[in-house]
Image (tube, helix red, strand yellow):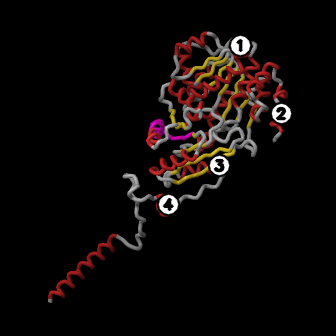
C-alpha cells in the first residue's frame, strides 16, 4: 500500500456533512486520484488529471465541487462528458452528493426531450452536465447563458476530442468567464489533450496516477488468431464456459445487432446490444437490463461501451480488434475491477490485424506476440469440408516458382502427350 492509499477521508478537509455522505455511499478510503485531486480542487486550482479507467476520477471532481458550491444559489458548475451514458452517470453521482445539500442537477443529452431540458435549465440548476453537441444546441436557442459558470469540468477529455467535439468545446469555452476553475480528466495525455489544456486552463496542477502492482487491474489476457468465419464459434465456446457477465466489443453499429442475432440463433438468448443510433429510451433500457442481470451479455461499440460503468464484468471479448490501440486499454478496463481477476479475449485475423496487435503490444510495453505461420495456421483452424461454411475454401500451399513454373508445366504435359502418341503407333506396327 502506497502513501496516498493510507490517507483517510478525514485528512482531506471535508465538512462533517460531506463525510457523512461519503460514509453512506460506502467509500472506505480515497483512491489515489481522489486523494491527490480533491485537495487541489478545494483550493480552487486548475487540475489536469490522468488516471486509468475505473480509478475513481468522477468522485474526485464531484466531491470537491459540491463541497465548494453547496451553499450558493445559481448555476456555477458545468461538466462536459463525451457520451449520453457518461453524462447520465456523472449526473447521477452529482445528485447523490448534491441533492442532500439542496443542489439541483440538469442533464442535457442528445435524444432527450429538448423542451424538458429547457424547463430544467430555466430553474437555474446548481450543476449542468451535458454533452458538447447538446449544450451548443441550447446555446444557439438562447436556452441558457454561461456567464456565471465558475467551475468547468472536462470529463473523459481524450474521448471528447477523439469524437470530434473540439469545435463545440471552443464555442462553449468562449462563453465562460476566463476567471474560472477548470478541471480536466483523461485516461491519457494525448497531444490533443495537452493542446486543449494549454488553451483552456491556467497554470494547472498535474495529477498523474501511474499504474502500480496494486492499482493495475488483474486481467488474464488471451489472443486468438482466427479467420473471420471461425470467430463466432470461438465466441460461443467462451460464452458457454464463462458464467459471469460478458462485454463484447465490435467496431461498427450494424455489427452489434448482427452479432446479437447470430448468438440468438446459436441458442444464447441472454444477450442485448447497444449503439448510438438507438433511441435514447432503448439505450437506457439496454444498459439497465444489463446492470440488473436481465441480460448477462452486452454487445457494444467503443463509444457506447465506454459509457457503461459496471464493476463486476467477468470477461471482455474483443470480437473485433480496436482501430486505436488506446481503445484496447479502455475496453479491457471494464473487467478486473475492485480487486477481482478479470478475463479479456481478443480475436485477431492473421494478415489483417497484425499491425493493430503490434500497436497494442507497444502501448502496453510488451513484446509483439508471435504471428501465426500461415501454412500451419490453416492446418490448425481447418475443419472438415462437410462442416466448413460455404464461403470457406481451403487454399493449397503455394509452390516456389523456382521449383515449378507454368512454362515448365506446359512443356512436361506436351512431352508426355508426344511420348504417348509414339508409343501408340509403335504398338500398331
How much space separates mark 4 and mark 3, taking CA atoms? 23 Å
Q: Position of residue 117 (x, y in %)?
A: 56, 15
* Label 3, label 1: how far apart the Cα atoms are: 45 Å
**Residue position for label 4:** 380
Does dot 2 land on a helix, a strand or a loop?
A: loop
Q: Secondary structure at mark 1?
A: loop
Residue at 54% x, 40% y: name it.
249
Q: Is residue 126 above or below residue 29?
A: above
- The relative height of residue 297 versus residue 112 in the rendered view (above or below) is below
Answer whether labels 4 and 3 touch (C-beta < 8 Å): no
Residue at the disc numbered 1? 102
What segment is highlighted magenta in the picture? 247-260
The residue that mark 2 highlights is: 7
Tell which circle, 4 or 2, labels the residue nearer the N-terminal end.
2
Residue 411, horizontal then vertical, whole percent: 29, 75
Residue 165 within the segment the image draws in magenta? no
Amino acid at each position: 500500500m502506497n502513501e496516498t492509499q493510507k490517507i483517510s477521508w478525514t485528512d482531506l478537509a471535508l465538512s462533517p456533512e460531506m463525510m457523512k455522505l461519503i460514509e453512506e455511499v460506502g467509500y472506505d478510503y480515497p483512491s489515489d486520484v481522489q486523494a491527490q485531486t480533491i485537495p487541489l480542487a478545494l483550493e480552487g486550482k486548475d487540475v489536469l488529471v490522468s488516471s486509468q479507467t475505473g480509478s475513481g476520477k468522477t468522485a474526485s471532481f464531484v466531491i470537491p465541487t459540491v463541497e465548494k458550491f453547496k451553499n450558493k444559489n445559481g448555476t456555477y458548475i458545468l461538466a462536459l462528458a463525451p457520451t449520453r451514458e457518461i453524462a447520465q452517470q456523472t449526473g447521477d453521482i452529482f445528485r447523490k452528493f448534491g441533492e442532500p445539500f439542496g443542489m439541483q442537477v440538469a442533464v442535457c443529452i442528445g435524444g432527450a426531450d429538448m423542451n424538458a431540458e429547457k424547463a430544467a435549465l430555466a430553474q437555474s440548476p446548481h450543476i449542468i452536465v451535458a454533452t458538447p453537441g447538446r449544450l451548443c444546441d441550447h446555446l444557439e436557442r438562447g436556452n441558457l447563458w454561461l456567464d456565471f459558470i465558475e467551475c468547468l469540468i472536462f470529463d473523459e477529455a481524450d474521448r471528447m476530442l477523439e469524437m470530434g467535439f473540439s469545435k463545440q468545446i471552443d464555442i462553449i469555452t468562449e462563453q465562460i468567464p476566463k476567471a474560472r476553475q477548470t478541471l480536466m480528466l483523461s485516461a491519457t495525455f494525448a497531444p490533443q489533450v495537452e493542446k486543449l489544456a494549454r488553451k483552456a486552463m491556467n497554470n494547472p496542477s498535474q495529477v498523474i496516477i501511474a499504474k502500480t502492482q496494486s492499482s493495475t487491474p488483474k486481467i488474464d489476457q488471451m489472443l486468438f488468431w482466427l479467420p473471420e468465419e471461425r470467430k463466432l464459434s470461438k465466441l460461443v465456446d467462451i460464452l458457454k464456459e464463462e458464467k459471469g457477465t460478458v462485454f463484447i466489443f465490435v467496431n461498427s453499429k450494424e455489427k452489434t445487432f448482427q452479432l446479437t442475432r447470430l448468438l440468438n440463433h446459436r441458442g444464447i438468448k441472454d444477450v442485448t446490444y447497444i449503439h448510438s443510433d438507438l433511441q435514447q429510451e432503448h439505450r437506457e433500457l439496454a444498459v439497465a437490463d444489463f446492470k440488473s442481470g436481465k441480460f448477462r451479455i452486452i454487445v457494444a461499440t467503443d463509444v457506447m461501451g465506454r459509457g457503461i460503468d459496471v464493476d463486476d464484468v467477468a470477461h471482455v471479448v474483443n470480437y473485433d480488434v480496436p482501430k486505436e490501440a488506446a481503445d484496447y486499454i479502455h475496453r479491457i478496463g471494464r473487467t478486473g475491477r475492485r480487486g477481482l481477476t478479470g478475463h479479456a479475449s481478443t480475436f485477431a485475423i492473421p494478415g489483417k490485424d497484425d499491425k493493430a496487435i503490434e500497436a497494442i503490444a507497444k502501448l502496453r510495453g510488451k513484446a509483439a506476440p508471435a504471428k501465426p505461420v500461415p501454412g500451419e495456421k490453416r492446418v490448425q483452424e481447418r475443419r472438415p469440408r462437410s462442416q466448413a461454411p460455404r464461403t470457406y475454401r481451403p487454399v493449397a500451399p503455394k509452390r516456389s516458382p523456382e521449383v515449378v513454373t507454368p512454362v515448365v508445366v506446359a512443356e512436361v504435359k506436351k512431352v508426355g502427350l508426344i511420348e504417348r502418341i509414339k508409343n501408340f503407333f509403335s504398338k500398331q506396327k
